[in-house]
Every structure is written in structure tokens, then in C-alpha cells.
Image: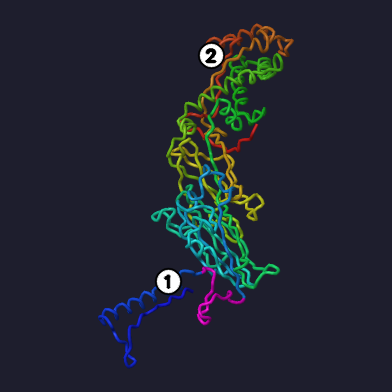
Amino acid sequence: MAVVLVWLKITGMEDGRIIQTEDSNMKQNRILNYIGAAGLLLAVCACGKENLNTTVDGGSDGAATALPEGTFVVDYSVSDGETSRTFEGGLDANQRISSLLYLLYDSEGRLVKEREIPDINDKTTWPLTRDKMTWEQREALKDTLNSGSTYTAVFLANVKKDLFGNNTQTEELLQNKENLTEAVLYLPQTPFTDNNMYYLWKEKLEYTQPKGASDDSRDNPLSKKIILRRLVSRMDITKAEVTDGMIKDGLKEFYYPDENAEANKILKAVETALNNFAEEACPTEGDLWNKNLGILKNKLKGKGVNEKTVYSEVFESCLSQLVDKCKDNELYESHVASWNKNIDVSFTYTKQANIYNINSLQAVHKDDILSNPNYSVLEDGSIVTIVFSNFSNSAVSDDDFNQLSAFEVGEADYTLDTPWKVVMGPNEMVSLSCNPVAKIASTDPGNSMSVDVTVDMKSLFGDLDSFTSSNNDFIYDNVMQEDLIDAMNSVFSDKYGSWDALKLTLQLPSLENDKLALKASLTEPTNP
């Protein structure tokens, strides 16, 4: 403490009284001014040397004393951590962290302290170390706690409701904070942006006095380096450019899953068309004609040169026409169209992870929470959703938990053939490719459309004479080979073309108008 001495010049005394040798009032005023200035200097000096970690005992004449017995000092510094920069273009922490909340719980999980760290904004200098903090931040980021007690300290970033719009975010994002085991974060009602994603740090605090250290923990405080980790994860989805090959693959499960005619609608349509041709080409008058009709049907569906069949010869032509039928459909056009910037995007989940338990560090689903906001298509034509996600070894084992089942981009509704199970863990990003035509089917299999194909039967089975000969199992008696050839020739020209260019009309489930059904798929691209 500084001491100010005030020296007053006394000019004379008489009978114990002060004798004023100049204007008495002037001298009296000068003395009062000296005394007032001295008092002000004493007050300034007493305050100017305050030690922020000093406990002052008024009974000890203002001398610094040790902390109260059984207490210790904890000193926090805060960083966002390099691993938190994985998916927002390398933005600095002051562009990503807009608020910071400190919560302290006792050993029974009861909230004993809550403090908003001041001056967290786009001007904040990160990391928050003692040499960079404001005075208010230094005060907020230290604490005096009881030795021998166990605490849990929690730091949460960006959990203020007003960061998500006061008019749209109607609920507090941090709920049940009074009890650590019940404290949860809700997904917001508006989309996350780069400057309001959730971050968390949580750790138990216990103080052990270092060996040989003084009893005053200010000389050796418990120093905690807080590294904030992002809680949410991000899925980036881009739409693949659709090719004819992708359309053919999409048609496969519905139209030609295997070589079994019961499941293979193209094969069944070919065999039906060949049967129709045989029945028109072979009269059914008498047993011999009936037998030859059966032989003709079997031969037409059988194998020819190089093990080829009518089905194998017309398959590609038929498939190409199915591709064209898809392309002509408005539903197809809307699903393969480019995703334009700023178009609204909504996501549909099964048992979405919509709350995050701060104690267990697990995301879970709660039925009565509506927090699945709409996003917008980005400038590069991709779409993004930011979500809670657990690791694959999570205790939440429900198979239906946190599955993306569909999403809508503008007017186009993409239903996923296989829901995408969101399993990443916090602060992860996955890039997905959307195939909008992964599965193509008809909504009305009983409603058929016509597909015309042509096959060179001569190249496949030889000329008509050799094909219909008795050496090829046909039976002749009163019916001659010429009779069968004449009968077949009679139906060629007007309807079926010719033997070397046989025309067949296949009836397949319709893909026209509103009969087309599309399902999309999501895949994670692999590096070559």
C-alpha cells in the first residue's frame, strides 16, 4: 500500500491556536484541498494492485491470505481442436463458435454452477488462453472448488436458442440441465449452419496436491485444457448422372431377375409371343397337327446355333425399349433433373436421433420431438443434412434407429430402396452418391404395354425346310412337311414378317404415364 505524507506549513501559534499570517480563509481552503487529494490517492493505491486470485481478510488489515481451507483453484483454457475442422471449409473458431456455456455438477449429478462465458463472438481470439482472454473471460474461466469432492465440468458451445432464430426456435435446446444424467440437447427446429453447430467437452474434476507443493493451490492450480469436439455429423449427397446402363440395372429386379420364366417377365413375354405365333401358324385339326404344334412351341423356345435362344436374341432390343419408355416418363425426368441451388430439401427418418444425452454421450430418439428442419440445395448442386449420430458400437441397438428412408428435393420425392442407417459418430462426415433409378418397376403389373422386337430365325435355327424336317423331331404322315411350311408362311407376311425377320409383340408391365415407380439408393463411393 502506498503512503502519502501531507506536510502543512504552520505560520504561528498563539495560546495554542493557529495564527493565520495571510488571508485566513485562503489558507484554510488550501489545507482542505491537500487533505482531499491525499484521501483520493490512498483509495486509488489501495485498489490498483488487486490480485484476482487473492482472498483478502478484512481482519488482517487487508493482507493477502490463503484460500479457505479445503478448497482448490481450477483454471480453464479452451480450444476448438484441429479435428473439428473436418467439414466446413477450414473456418476459424471465431466463425464457428458463437456462444460458450460452463456447467458444473457435483458427484451426485446436481447442477451447482452455470456460467455463460462472455465475449464469445466473431472477434474472439482463439484458443482462449490466459494471455489472450479478456479480463471478464479470465474471471469466468476459473473456479474455486472444494478439495476432496468430485465434480463433472461440462462446456457446451452454440446451445443458445437465439442462434437458431427467435421466431422459429420455440424450445430451449438444452433441456433438464439441473441433473447431469437427464441433461439433453435437442436438434434445432432450423438447419444448422457453419456458426451454430453444437460442441461439447465433459470431464470429471478431482484435485490432488502435487508432492512438495504449498497448501495454497493458487501456486499450483488444477489446469484444464478444454478441447471442444463437435457433436453433430454431416451427410453430403450428390446425385449421380444417370446412364442407360444404370437404367437397365434398375429394371433388372422387376423385369429379369433370373432365367426363370415365372420371375423373368421378359422371358415370359417372349415365350407367350412365340406360343401365339405357333398357334396361328399350325392348324389344330387332328392329333398329328396337335402333336406338331407342341413340337413347334418347344423348338421355338429351344436353343439354336451357339446355344442362343429367341430370348437371348431379342433381350437387348427389348431392354433398350424399356429404357426409352422410362426416359419418356415425367416422373423419371423429374428425378434425374439437376438439383438447383436454393430448392428446399426435406428428409424423412425412421426413429431419428433427435436428442443427445450429455452424460452418456449417446444420441437417442424421442417420439414427441419435431426437429427435422428443411435444408436447401447448395450452390454446387449437392444437398446436406447435419444430424446426431452414434458410433457403430453404440448401446442403442434398435435396427430401425436413425435410418434415413426418404428425402424430397423440390417436387421430386426420393424413396430409398434400402434405408441408409446413419452410423458415424460425432464430428464425422460422409459423402454419398444418390442413384435415383436404383429400382424401376411398374405400379400396375396387370396393365401391359407393347414392345415390338424382330429376330432372324434363319440364323438361329437354319432355313424353314431344315427347321421343320422330321430330322428335327417333327412327325409327318397324312400331314406333310409342305403343309406345315405353307401354314407358317401364311401368317408371316401380314403379321409376323418372315422367317429371317420374325416380328414379335411382347406384352410387358407398363411403365407409361403414372405406372412408373422409382426407388433411389445411397452409396458411399470407394477410392479406386
Residue 427 in view: yes
413 lies above or below 233:
above
Q: Nearer the viewer, mark 2 or mark 1?
A: 1
Taking 525 as reference, is 117 left or right?
left
Q: What residue do we see at 45% from left, 52% from top?
A: 123
Q: What kind of secondary structure does the magenta stretch mostly adopt?
A: loop
Residue 64 among those drawn in magenta: yes
Task: Tell me how far mark 2 sits from mark 1, CA to CA.
Answer: 113 Å
* Residue interval drawn in magenta: 51-69
Q: Which residue is mark 2?
A: 495
Amino acid type of the residue that numbered disc 2 sits on in the rendered structure: Lys
250 lies above or below 472:
below
Residue neighbourhood size for the residue with mark 1, other residues' Cα within 10 Å, grouped as few (<14), some (14–19), many (≥20): few
* Mark 2 or 1, nearer chain start: 1
Q: Which residue is mark 1?
A: 44
384 lies above or below 246:
below
**Tag 2 secondary structure:** helix
- Closer-to-camera residue (53/167): 53
